[in-house]
Each structure stands twice: as C-alpha cells, then as structure tokens.
Amino acid sequence: MAAPLFSVNAHRYDPYRTFKFQIIIDGQVVAGMRKMGALKKTTEAVKWRSAGDPSHERVMPGGTTYEAITLEQGLTHDTVFEKWANLVNNIDGDGAISLKDFRKDIIVNVLNLQGNVAISYKVFRCWVSEYQSLPELDAGTMNAVGIQTVTLQHEGWQRDSSVTEPTES
C-alpha cells in the first residue's frame, strides 16, 4: 500500500482539485474567478569548464526567472482588475504611473472540497502587464460567459507555512 499523502487526513488518497481556489488582492477575495495560470519558475543552467579538467563540463545554477501569471475573472461589477491595470498606466495621457500602488502582493489559496484553505502562496510584487476588459462579443453564442483577463508580472512566490492541512470530515 502506498504511503499516505496527507498527514492529518491519513484516510485521504486523492490530491486537491484545481477548481476550488481563491485569489486575494488588497485583502479582498476576487469575485468570479475562473482560472489562474501556473506558478512556474526556471533557473538557468550555467555550463563551465575548469582549466585543470577541460574534458568535463560542469553545470551550476544561474539566474531564476518567474513566468507571468494569467488570471481570468467572469464579467461582473467587480472592478479590481480594471483599477489595478489603470495604476500601471495613467489613462489621462501624461504617462505617469502610481509608483506607490501599482505593485501588489497577492495571495493564492487552494481550498479543499469543504471550502477550507488547504495550501496558500504569497506572490510578490505583482503588476499588470496586460489587461482585457471585455471578451469578443458575439450575439450568436447564447451560452458563452464573458471573461476579463489580466496578466501579472511578479518577482516570485513563497508557500505560507503557517497554513496547515485542515481536518476533513
């Protein structure tokens, strides 16, 4: 038998589902979240050879880059994406940006099936590099849902170790 994947809920063998999550921006849960891109980082491999051993190539870690995150929100009256995107470029035409407010730390919570926070990450110094306020509108699609999209550049993330596995019934 396989080793338990969960220390508190040893009876559980199924991993967490990807449809139960929440994004918190400025302390508020974002309404109507549909999808979030993966948290992904890549560390460059730096290859080098030593003068005393030119026949063997060595590899060491180089710089790390973080892939942008895309957030999708169902079209609602929640203006969090629009307000944030407008902080990055001033729509009044003078090109000024809010140097104080345009970067934000966000929280990503993975929830269990009971809706309790099971895993949490803090993503640092995010800012909106792309914003889509309206999707393509098409009168021929009766069942389509309108989606707003933001692409966030960021400077990494860290798992919140204070969030522990919740007891499930």
Image (spheres, rainbow, N blue to C red):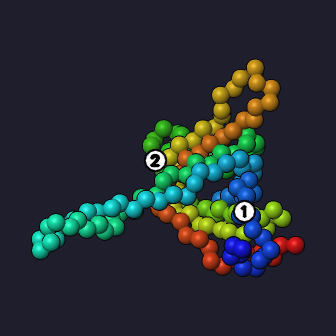
Compared to residue 136, the image places residue 117 above or below, namely below
Q: In the rendering, at what x and y percent does residue 166 appear? A: 77, 75
Front-most of residues 74 and 37: 37
Q: In the rendering, at what x and y percent does residue 53 appear? A: 15, 72
Q: Earlier in the sequence, mark 2 or mark 1?
A: 1
Residue placed at 71% from the left, 47% from the top?
A: 34
Task: For the residues labelled 2 and 1, say whether their Cβ atoms are less than 8 Å apart.
Answer: no
What quarter of the picture does the C terminus occupy? bottom right
Residue 11 location, quadrant: bottom right
Could you classify mark 1 by the number of other residues whose Cα lies within 10 Å: few (under 14), some (14-19), or many (20 or more)?
Answer: few
- Which amino acid type corresponds to the residue marked 1 in the rendered image? Tyr
Residue placed at 34% from the left, 67% from the top?
A: 61
- Give residue 16's mark: 1
Residue placed at 53% from the left, 66% from the top?
A: 157
Residue 74 location, quadrant: top right
- Which amino acid type corresponds to the residue marked 2 in the rendered image? Ala
Horizontal side of residue 44 vs 47, given as left or right: right
Could you classify mark 2 by the number of other residues whose Cα lies within 10 Å: few (under 14), some (14-19), or many (20 or more)?
Answer: few
What quarter of the picture does the N terminus occupy? bottom right
- Give how far apart the Cα atoms at labels 2 and 1 are: 43 Å
> Mark 2, mark 1: which one is toward the viewer?
1
Q: In the rendering, at what x and y percent does residue 68 appear? A: 50, 51
Front-most of residues 7 and 38: 7
